[in-house]
Amino acid sequence: MSFALQPARAAGAALPATPEEWRVRVDLAAAYRLAALQGWDDLIYTHLSATVPGEPGHFLINPFGFAFDEIRASDLVKINGRGEVVGESRHPVNVTGFALHAAVHAARADAHCVMHLHNTAGVAVSAQAGGLLPLSQHAMRFHGRLGYHDYEGLAFTPAEGSRLTVSLGGHPAMLLRNHGTLTVGRTVAEAYVLMATLIKACEIQIGAQAGGAVVAVPEPVASRTSAQLHDDGAVEGELEWPALLRKLDRIDAGYRD
């Protein structure tokens, strides 16, 4: 959770969205709606951001004050790396909240989408000394591929941004200790599916621990399974995303507006 800061003045005249930008807008709005359906939202807090195709240094983010389940493609605000609005927008953005995203986008060329959530299971596992344990196939997706960053307080400084990106390294996901979850993706779909897998792994862990003593997968098996899940290097979400959009369309296609 972070506090609202009004955006700086518009950094230039708005141009009509290109077809490529509009596709990203639709995907990002869908990710917000899907996150709300799963109960991953936290009132109006946390953010999902995506780069604007063909516009280096420009990003799309939710207007601050909107619930995840009401965000439409046209509501997303275009900003630069300093959180300043690009073009005209009638909506404010949470510049403080974007600072974490800005650091990750700047450090990782492959981070076209950054998702950060305060989901309950993710925060719970992040607060455990052992972090995510190899208790499920979902967890083994991240075995040896999950960063951890210690909690430093509400204020997010450039210095912490540097430390956070070192903690993330080249991993696809991270647990922010006592805070939440973070995933990065080459597409919105990939970041979303990674987040869904990470949250599922955390939910399974909390559920298993509540039932008593747990049985962890041995290290050699966990490492082999993790490698098997990464062998082809495919962009995750390519198969799942169309099905998720069809599900959302059946419920409410308003995110496409």
Image (spheres, rainbow, N blue to C red):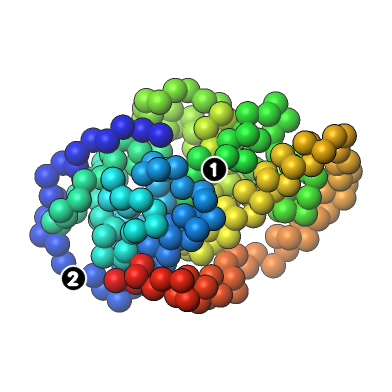
Q: Residue at x 44, y 42 (%)?
A: 42
Q: Secondary structure at mark 1?
A: loop
Q: Residue at x 58, y 35 (%)?
A: 123
Which image quadrant for residue 58?
bottom left
Task: Assign the N terminus to one quadrant of the image.
Answer: top left
Residue 91 got which mark? Answer: none
- What residue is shown with label 2? 16
Examine the rendering and report whether any part of residue 72 can be seen: yes
Q: Residue at x 16, y 55 (%)?
A: 89
Residue 64 spot, x, y in % from top left: 28, 45
- What residue is shown with label 1? 119
Relative height, residue 82 to residue 136 (above, below): above
Residue 209 spot, x, y in % from top left: 78, 36
Examine the rendering and report whether any part of residue 107 can be seen: no
Which image quadrant for residue 232?
bottom right
C-alpha separation, residue under disc 2 versus residue under disc 1: 35 Å
Q: Residue at x 63, y 29 (%)?
A: 127
What is the three-letter code of the residue carrying label 1? Asn
